[in-house]
Amino acid sequence: MKILVCGGAGYIGSNMTAALLKAGHSPVVFDNLSKGHRAAVKDAPFVEGDFGDPEAIRKALRGNRIEAVMHFAAFIEVGESVESPLRYYENNVSRTRTLLQAMEECGVEKFVFSSTAAVYGMPETVPITESTAKRPINPYGETKWAVERMCHFQSMTGRLRYAALRYFNACGAGSGGTLGEDHRPESHLIPIVIQAAMGRRDGVKIFGADYPTPDGTCVRDYIHIEDLCKAHLLALGKLDGERELAYNLGNGTGYSVRQVIDTVRRVSGKDVKVVEAPRRPGDPPVLTADASKARRELGWKTDFPDLESIVSSAWKFHESRPEGYGRD
Ligand code: UDP
């Protein structure tokens, strides 16, 4: 299938592009390189453009005879979304609306959307199922949920088929450790701990050591990027017979911040300095996925459920690219 990968130069989009190629699809990467990296686009055609530009999108859709769109071009910083909510509504909602409109005009029906566990906010119970109440607690989660609702209503018209995939903590590096995380600034735990192990930052702050969890630090569900991408392929296939799909993507196993730090120490053989810092606002103590729906309906199985293999792949990426993707 010919697939437009919006945000295909970013962390998840570049891994998805690689997975599509491997599965025999023909992805076309569409990215404005505001966050993504040209060097992360390897073997697929690349179109530099903005998904908020209707003409550029229509041209990319028609010119490449696109049959489905996968959308990864969103802003993802919770703190920044609280500081600048309008920026998040503009990028994550308004531009996605433009993209959906261009798809409608070009008769492209299939859409795979990168959603997030942040749509659930502070859930009362874990693991989280797809029917857990959606109560986002920051503009980031709210904008992702707004797009899911927009897709829902658009799908009711019969002009859209979509899958919303709610990621827990995407991490690790794909394609033999060559496609990894390089966010600027970096806020995600695993790359931060790895950078500390490499001596590229002084140490790691643990945001809260007084949570009601076994070791006092937050517990998250870390999911390897290649496992995540595998679920997208399966969801895309299922859109032939379905108009509306939503799945949680996680392993169902939680690891604490301290466990992540210890795993990086073990995998790298390096020490990591740690300081206990205040809680980060909006962090629930435990977030784990009930992903049984994806396993049951999509036949999804994860290949890298253990933290050790996730961290090893990420370590490989950072070791081979200490500066990340550089400036290209
Ligand atoms: N975290 C931390 N120190 C850091 C970065 C993150 O203690 O420098 C914690 C954070 O509070 C959360 C967990 O690590 O409990 C995972 O955070 P991340 O930002 O990677 O993902 P999130 O769960 O927010 O999507």
Image: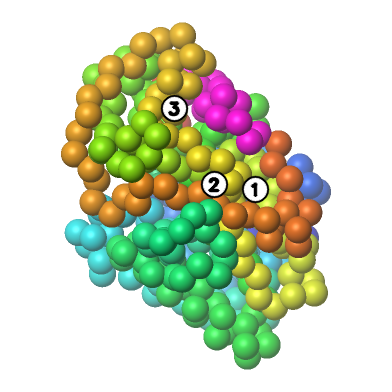
Q: Which residue is mark 2?
A: 12
Q: Where residue 328 sits in the image (x, y, percent)?
A: 43, 36
Q: Is residue 149 above or below residue 50?
A: below
Q: Which residue is mark 1?
A: 229
In the rendered structure, the answer to whether residue 30 lies left or right of residue 258 reads: right
Structural crowding at the residue carrying mark 1, measured as other residues with C-alpha within 10 Å and reported as few (<14), some (14–19) or many (≥20): many
In the rendered structure, the answer to whether residue 271 lies left or right of residue 307 reads: left
**Could you tell me the amino acid type at mark 1?**
Cys
The magenta region covers 304-321
Q: Where residue 232 sits in the image (x, y, percent)?
A: 67, 55
Q: Residue at x 42, y 47 (%)?
A: 286
Structural crowding at the residue carrying mark 2, measured as other residues with C-alpha within 10 Å and reported as few (<14), some (14–19) or many (≥20): many
Q: Earlier in the sequence, mark 3 or mark 1?
A: 1
Q: Where residue 277 sits in the image (x, y, percent)?
A: 20, 33
Q: Decide if residue 120 is in sight here.
A: yes
Q: Residue at x 59, y 38 (%)?
A: 224
Q: Is mark 2 within 8 Å of ligand 1?
A: no
Cα–Cα gap, marks 2 and 3: 24 Å
Q: Residue at x 72, y 62 (%)?
A: 236
